Image (cartoon, rainbow, N blue to C red):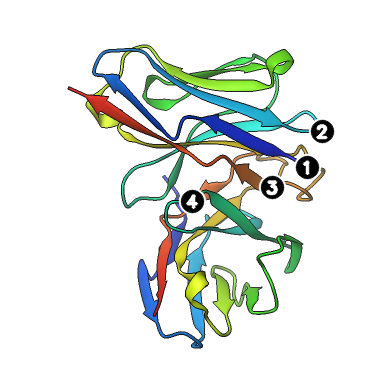
Amino acid sequence: EPEVTQTPSHQVTQMGQEVILRCVPISNHLYFYWYRQILGQKVEFLVSFYNNEISEKSEIFDDQFSVERPDGSNFTLKIRSTKLEDSAMYFCASRAPELPLSTDTQYFGPGTRLTVL
Amino acid sequence: AQSVTQLGSHVSVSEGALVLLRCNYSSSVPPYLFWYVQYPNQGLQLLLKYTTGATLVKGINGFEAEFKKSETSFHLTKPSAHMSDAAEYFCAVSDRGSMNRDDKIIFGKGTRLHILP
């Protein structure tokens, strides 16, 4: 069964460094998302992406964050200058187009645990 | 704005007993409703979803949930708990946005289910 994959599974970085989290969505999906889960807290929406542009972003997704689909398969989340409070599990998700593969389901990857020291 | 409230951050049931995890939602438009499960150190797996039609939704692993519009509830049940059901369960809501707009998923804080032998 097709699945969303994410790399790396765990990333440790120093405060102020740039990190890029990578995701490979399911191949025929066109909608892409990033969510994060700070330890012990709920999963929060960061950004949605469609047709090579951001569709919606939350207040968490400030100028330090950016997303990109550099090629036909990868979907990346970049944090320009990491802060301690960016430490979290970051989940990528993807969804098929409504038609003809009508579905409302976002499929989640296994996550990347980001630790900022 | 949409929101989800899960009653009880921790629920313990005996193996073989009924599992009931409560979820209430708030939405200004007819919602899509989901239950996701997260096993330790793993990503989010969709258990079941309600989009339209029959209000009793059956999911994987013997779980089901009933959409009750009058009560704004979407409680998750399973007749007989198994040790392997121990995990974190997230109730979630999404807007029926047109195309990809407003389709972010809003998660509840989660309920950790403990199964007692």
- Considering only vertical position in the picture, is B83 above or below A60? above
Question: Looking at the picture, how far across and down is residue B95, in whole percent?
Answer: 74, 39
What amino acid is labelled 2 in the image? Answer: Ser
Give the residue displayed 64% in from the left and 79% down from the top.
Answer: A64
Kindly identify the amino acid type of the residue bearing the numbered disc 4.
Gln
| Residue B31 lies in quadrant | top right
Give the labeled residue for mark 2.
Answer: B28
The span from disc 1 to disc 3 (Cα, nearest Å) is: 25 Å
Instruction: Tell whether label 4 touches label 1 (CB within 8 Å).
Output: no
| Residue type (three-letter) at the residue carrying disc 1 | Ala
**Callouts 4 and 2 on one subunit:** no
User: Is B110 left or right of B41, judged from the image as shown?
Assistant: right
For this rendering, which residue is in front, A107 or B68?
A: B68
The residue tagged 1 is B1
Please tell me whether mark 2 sits on a helix, a strand or a loop. loop
Chain of the residue where label 2 is placed in the rendered structure: B
Residue B4, percent across and down?
63, 35
Q: CA distance from mark 4 to mark 2?
A: 25 Å
Chain letter of mark 1 equals B
Q: Is residue B53 visible in the rendered structure shown here?
A: yes
Q: Which residue is mark 4?
A: A41
Q: Earlier in the sequence, mark 4 or mark 3?
A: 4
Q: Nearer the observer, disc 4 or disc 3?
A: 4
Spatial CA span between label 1 and label 4: 20 Å
Mark carried by residue A97? 3
Q: At 56% from the left edge and 39% from the top edge, which residue is drawn?
A: B108
* Front label number (4 vs 2): 4
